[in-house]
Image: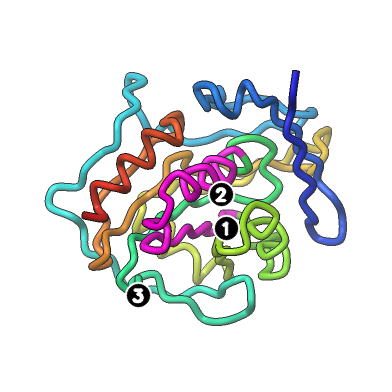
């Protein structure tokens, strides 16, 4: 069976993520609280009842124009979309399953969008400020696509961003795991329309084809 091996440089070490192709290009679904290599990741429930359809904010929500730091060390304001649709995901680079899977799905979505991909920016916000520096974020997102944006900051800078998306972030110590800890974070991605308003929440488990169609509805 073919498999995809992604080597991601993280904090001077290398995290080896092995994802079976059947998992990646099948349903694209991982169980919440799944274990990989003895490391457990817990994600907040985002799709009650297992309904895997994008939630539409009606009306779209205005967000505060908060600033974080991008992977190159530059200020990055969430509200300044530059006229693009912005896909935002809150996760962390030591995540063994859901976060790298989301990045792989983004890569597929970008390719599927074709020329329309120029109208979309993909942004990962860290849920792990103690570990995910700009350099770590750059190595992580860049391993999937050089155009992906990775945002970090202090906990005091990140907390209001998490709060805007209703993200419940918590860290659990796991001494027997490879990373030594796990972070609870949302598994959904959040979509800002070109005007900067929060318009969609796409639950984890939507296939890349379905995510592509969700985004195309905002690119007309």
- Badge 1 or badge 2: first in the primary sequence: 2
Q: What residue is disc 1 on?
A: 126
Q: What residue is disc 3 on?
A: 82
Please, what is the dominant secondary structure of the magenta stretch? helix
Per the rendering, the mark at residue 66 is none
Report the quarter where the N terminus lies.
top right
Residue 147, image x and y in percent? 56, 64
| Lateral position of residue 217 relative to residue 13, left or right | left
- Please tell me which residue is depicted at 20% across the width and 47% down the height of the picture: 57
Q: Secondary structure at mark 1?
A: strand
Q: From the viewer's side, name the closer residue of 127 and 19.
A: 19
Q: Nearer the viewer, mark 3 or mark 2?
A: 3
Q: What residue is disc 2 on?
A: 91
Q: Are marks 1 and 2 in contact (CB under 8 Å)?
A: yes
- Badge 1 or badge 3: first in the primary sequence: 3
| Lateral position of residue 109 relative to residue 57, left or right | right
C-alpha separation, residue under disc 3 versus residue under disc 2: 23 Å
| Lateral position of residue 165 relative to residue 178, left or right | left
- Please tell me which residue is depicted at 35% across the width and 75% down the height of the picture: 82
- Please tell me which residue is depicted at 69% across the width and 38% down the height of the picture: 96
Q: Which residues are magenta?
A: 101-127
């Amino acid at each position: 069976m073919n498999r995809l091996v992604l080597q991601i440089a993280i904090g001077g070490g290398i995290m080896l993520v092995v994802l079976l192709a059947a998992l990646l290009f099948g349903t694209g679904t991982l169980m919440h609280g799944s274990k990989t290599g003895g490391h457990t990741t817990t994600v907040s429930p985002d799709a009650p009842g297992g309904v895997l359809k994008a939630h539409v904010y009606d009306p779209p929500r205005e967000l505060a124009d908060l600033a974080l730091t991008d992977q190159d060390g530059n200020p990055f304001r969430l509200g300044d979309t530059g006229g693009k649709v912005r896909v935002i995901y809150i996760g962390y680079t030591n995540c063994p399953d859901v976060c790298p899977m989301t990045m792989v799905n983004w890569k597929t979505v970008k390719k599927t969008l074709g020329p329309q991909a120029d109208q979309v920016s993909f942004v990962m916000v860290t849920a792990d400020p103690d570990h995910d520096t700009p350099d770590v974020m750059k190595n992580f997102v860049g391993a999937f696509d050089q155009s992906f944006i990775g945002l970090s900051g202090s906990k005091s800078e990140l907390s209001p961003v998490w709060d805007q998306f209703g993200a419940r972030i918590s860290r659990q110590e796991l001494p027997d795991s490879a990373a030594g800890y796990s972070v609870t974070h949302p598994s959904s991605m959040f979509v800002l329309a070109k005007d900067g308003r929060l318009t969609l929440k796409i639950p984890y488990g939507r296939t890349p084809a379905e995510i592509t169609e969700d985004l195309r509805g905002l690119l007309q």
